[in-house]
Amino acid sequence: MPQNELMEGDLQQKNEVSQKDLMEGNLHRKIKMFQKGMTRTAKMSQKRLMKQDLGELDVAKLHPLSPEVVSCQPTTNIGTIGHVAHGKTTVVRAISGVQTNRFKCELERNITMKLGYANAKMKTALGLCATSMSCGSGEEDNPLFDEPGYENCRMKLLRHVSFVDCPGHEILMATMLNGATIMDGAFLLVAANESCPQPQTLEHLSAVDILNLQNIVILQNKVDLVSEHQAKNQYQAIQEMVKGTAAEGAPVIPIAARLKYNIDVRDFVSPPHMIVIRSFDVNKPGCGVDETKGGVVGGSITRGVMKVNQVVELRPGLLGKDDSGNRICQPIYTRVISLFAEQNELQFAVPGGLIGVGTTMDPALSRCDRLVGQILGEVGTLPDVSVFLMRQLLGVRTQETQMVKVSKLRKGETIQVNVLSMVSKAKVVALNNGRARMQLAQPVCTRSGEKVALSRCIEKHWRLIGWGEILGGNTLDVRPPVPSGLYSRENQAPFSQK
Ligand SMILES: Nc1nc2c(ncn2[C@@H]2O[C@H](COP(=O)(O)OP(=O)(O)OP(=O)(O)O)[C@@H](O)[C@H]2O)c(=O)[nH]1
C-alpha cells in the first residue's frame, strides 16, 4: 500500500474483543487462560533473576545499576526515530531479537502505528572483551558464555534497556512525541538509499531538540543498497542536516539493519574468523626459490583475534572429486607469518577493517584472487560447507526512478547468490511457501542463519532481487589435515582437480 494512503481510521486497534467472543461467552475463558499463561511465564523467568525483597533492601540506596534493579527491570530507554520506512523497527529487531510490530494492521502494512517496545539485557564476558544482547527482561543475568573453550565462563549483566520504537509516518507524529518524552537517548535512522533530509527525519529531529534529548546516535541504514560514493555523499548531507540541532556532533554509523551488518558488538574472544575478499601471489616473476614468499590473503576479521604464527585453515579450500565422482573439498592448512594493516606490521589483528595475511601456503593457490570467498580461521572451528540454500524474494530497481516488480523465483532458473564474499551461480531446484532449495555451482563455507543476497540476470546485468537466510544445507566431506608435513605443497592437493 502506498504510505500516503494510510488513514487515521486505520489506527484503531485491531485486537479489540470481537462481537462473536462476547456472544459466545468465550471472553471470560480467554482472559483466564491468558492470565494463567502470563503468571506461569513470569514465575519461570523470575527464578533466574535477583530477588527483590523490600524487607531487606533499602530503596533509598538503590541506583539504576543495582543488581536487584537491573536484573528485573530496564533502566534506560533508547528510542528509534526517523522518516517512515528508514529501518527503525528492523534495527530494534536486529539488536534485541524482538519484533516490535505486533498488531495485525501493522504486520499487514509493514508500518509502525503504535509505540513498539523491546527489552534487552547487555552482558559481558571476560572483562569487556565480549558483549552480547539478549532479548527479554526474563533472560538470565549470568548465563554460560556460549563459546568453545570458554564453556565454564559466565557472562555478567551490564545494562538492561528498553527500546522505544516510534512510528515514522507523518500522521503519527503525536504518537512519536509520546515516545520521545520517555527517551534517555535515541537512534536517528537515515536510509542511505533516499535523499537526506526527508520530512519526517527533520520533524523527529526537531521534536527531540525541543525535548532537549542529548544522547543521539545517527544510524545511516540500508548501506547495502548504495555505492560507497553515495554513502559518503549522504554522510555530508547528514552533517549539514544536524548542524545546530541536538544531533550535531553525534556519531554517524553506517549499518545494514536487515543484514545485521555493523550491528554486532566486536567479539575478541571467539576463535578468529576472517572473510577473504582478495588473494595474491606477491612474488615477482623469476624470483629465486629461497626468496619466494607464501600466498597472501586480504579480508576482514569478523570475530576473534588472529596472531602471527598461528596455524589456520582456509575453507572450503581445494575443490575436487573423489574416485566415485562425488564432490569433495580439502581445507588448505597453513601458518600465519605476517599481518598487515596497510604498511603497519601487526603481531595480532582484531575484528573490523581490512587486513593482509601472509602465510606459508603455496603462492600458486592464492594467485589472481583464487581464494576470494573462502573463510580463514583457526583449525577445526570453521563451519560446515553447505550447498543448498533456502531464501525469500524482494525488489529491484532497473532505472534511477522506475521500480520494477520482481517476478517470483522459478523452478529450474539459474540465479546468482552471494554468501559472505563468495559469489556462486545457483539453480533453483524446489520452491515451497516462500522458501527455495538451491543447488550451488560451488560449495561455500557458511552456516545456517547466514544471510545471502540474490541476483537475477536482467537486461544483461546481474541485478539484486532479494535476500534470504540459510535454513539448512548438505555437508560435504572434508578431508582432515595430513598429519606429517602439514604445510608442504605436495600435501595440499591429495585428489584430482576435476
Ligand atoms: N535493503 C535493506 N532494507 C532494509 C534495511 N533495514 C530495513 N529495511 C527494510 O526497509 C523496510 C522498512 O523497515 P522498517 O524497519 O519497518 O522501517 P521503520 O522505520 O520502522 O518504518 P515505520 O516505523 O513504519 O516508519 C522493511 O521492508 C525492511 O525490511 C537494510 O539495512 N537494508
Image (cartoon, rainbow, N blue to C red):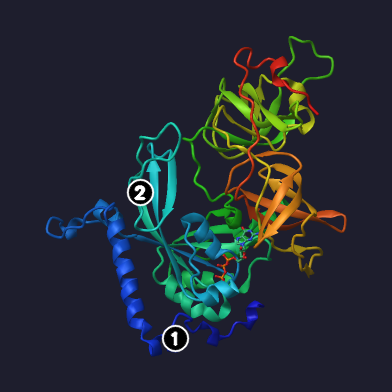
Q: Nearer the viewer, residue 339 or 343?
A: 339
Examine the rendering and report whether any part of residue 489 can be seen. Answer: no
Which one is in front in this view, the residue at disc 2 or the one at disc 1? Answer: 1
Which of 191/455 is in front? 455
Q: Residue at x 43, y 38 (%)?
A: 129
Determine whether the residue tagged by mark 1 lies in a helix, strand or loop.
loop
Quadrant showing the C terminus: top right
Please report whichever mark, 2 or 1, sits nearer to the chain's N-terminal start.
1
User: Where residue 18 is drawn, which disc sits there?
Assistant: 1
Q: Is residue 137 visible?
A: yes
Horizontal and vertical percent position of residue 369: 76, 33
Residue drawn at 63 percent across, 77 percent down: 3
| Ligand 1 quarter of the rendering | bottom right
| Residue type at the position of mark 1 | Ser
Residue drawn at x 62%, y 27% is: 313
State the image quarter where residue 401 is shown.
Answer: bottom right
Q: CA distance from mark 2 to mark 1?
A: 43 Å
The quadrant holding residue 336 is top right
Vertical comparison of 346 with 243: above or below: above
Q: How many marks?
A: 2
